[in-house]
Amino acid sequence: MNVVGATDISFSYQIGESEWNMGAKYQLKAVVFDVIEECRELKKALSEEGILVIVPFFGLQVESTLLEMLRETELTLGDCLMVTNNDQHARVATRLGLVTVGCVEGHFEIPKVDTLLEAPGEVSVCYLNQVYCHAKGFPAFITETERCIIRELAEEDMDELYEILTDREVAKYLPVKEGDREEEMEKLISYVSCVYSFYGYGYWGVFSRATGELIGRAGFKEGSYPLEAGYVIKRAEWGKGLATEVLSALVQYAEQELDCTEVFVKIDEENKASARVAQKCGVTMLPACQEQEENL
């Protein structure tokens, strides 16, 4: 497992019965390939990220082969994801609790799998890790900058996020209105539990690589195309160039992972600092619509 960060500090949360390590870039530890397509580039990318690539020969003993293979690697079923175009193998994998990606090739009779793909060789390591994390209930790594890690938010982050978003100076140019704390917290929790897995993107958390502290929120408004980017940085971190760093990473992520080369931001005409950030990143600016208020 690769560790991302400027220090050796590790941050862990207990989510359900599993421990999720914030210090790890990818929670996924191994991918089992059971497909006709060779997926050479994807296998190479997985290996470069320290994720084990397993290409087994199942024969007739699918379950025993899977279990023996894992014993040899000292991994558990919960550490792995399986990519398969064999419906019978998919059924065995899901019955064993393995996160399973089905490939719609040939006569694949779609069993209950975690997601379906048409061309497994065209997806990224980041995408497979997101499928794995969503199945496990973990917040997935999105991207990183020199000083920040951008990942999906978890329920454990909501108190810090609420404090950032309700800071008067931070919220000055945001199209939000502060409501009842308990009600707003419920909305934030509902957002992270639904939006990421449905759209594949949304507004994510921005964390300090050095301390693990939540220092902002950034991402894309769900359902928008071209993609509407948004970013908020904690007031104590202003003036350090972090917003520029984060927006640049979002633009690159949009192109590489979401196949979108058009990104824009809505900025209040009085928000000169945010306008400078957009200009530096070469992002199209549109005027903010102040009358369209919404809750956090």
Image (spheres, rainbow, N blue to C red):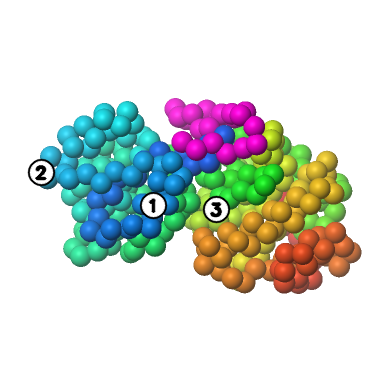
Q: Quadrant of residue 290?
A: bottom right
> Residue 107, percent across and down?
18, 63
Residue annotated with mark 3: 195
Q: Is 138 covered by the magenta stretch?
A: no
Q: Is residue 110 visible?
A: no
Looking at the image, residue 147 lies above or below residue 20: below
Q: Nearer the viewer, residue 157 or 295?
A: 157
Identify the residue position indicated by label 1 in the image: 44
Q: Amino acid at mark 2?
A: Leu
Specify which label sits upstream in the sequence, 3 or 2: 2
Badges 3 and 1: C-beta atoms under 8 Å apart? no
**Amino acid type, mark 1:** Lys
Q: CA distance from mark 1 to mark 2?
A: 28 Å
Q: Residue at x 46, y 45 (%)?
A: 49
Quick check: 129 above or below 229?
A: above
Could you tell which of marks 3 and 1 lies nearer the N-terminus? Answer: 1
Q: Residues within 10 Å of mark 2 (few under 14, many from 20)?
A: few
Q: Residue 62 vs residue 243: left or right? A: left
Residue 140 placement (x, y as % from top left): 52, 45
* Residue 277 visible somewhere in the drawing: yes
Which quadrant of the figure has residue 265?
Answer: bottom right
Badge 1 crowding class, 10 Å Cα cut-off, few under 14, some 14 to 19, many 20 or more, is: few
Residues packed near mark 3 inside 10 Å, few (<14), some (14 to 19) or many (20 plus): some
Disc 3 residue type?
Val
Badge 2 element: loop
Q: Which residue is mark 2?
A: 60
- Of residues 86 and 75, the one nearer the viewer is 75
Question: Is the residue 153 above or below the residue 16 in the image?
Answer: below
Residue drawn 77% across and 58% down?
A: 175
276 or 171: which is nearer to us? 276
Magenta span includes 7: yes
Which secondary structure, mark 1? helix
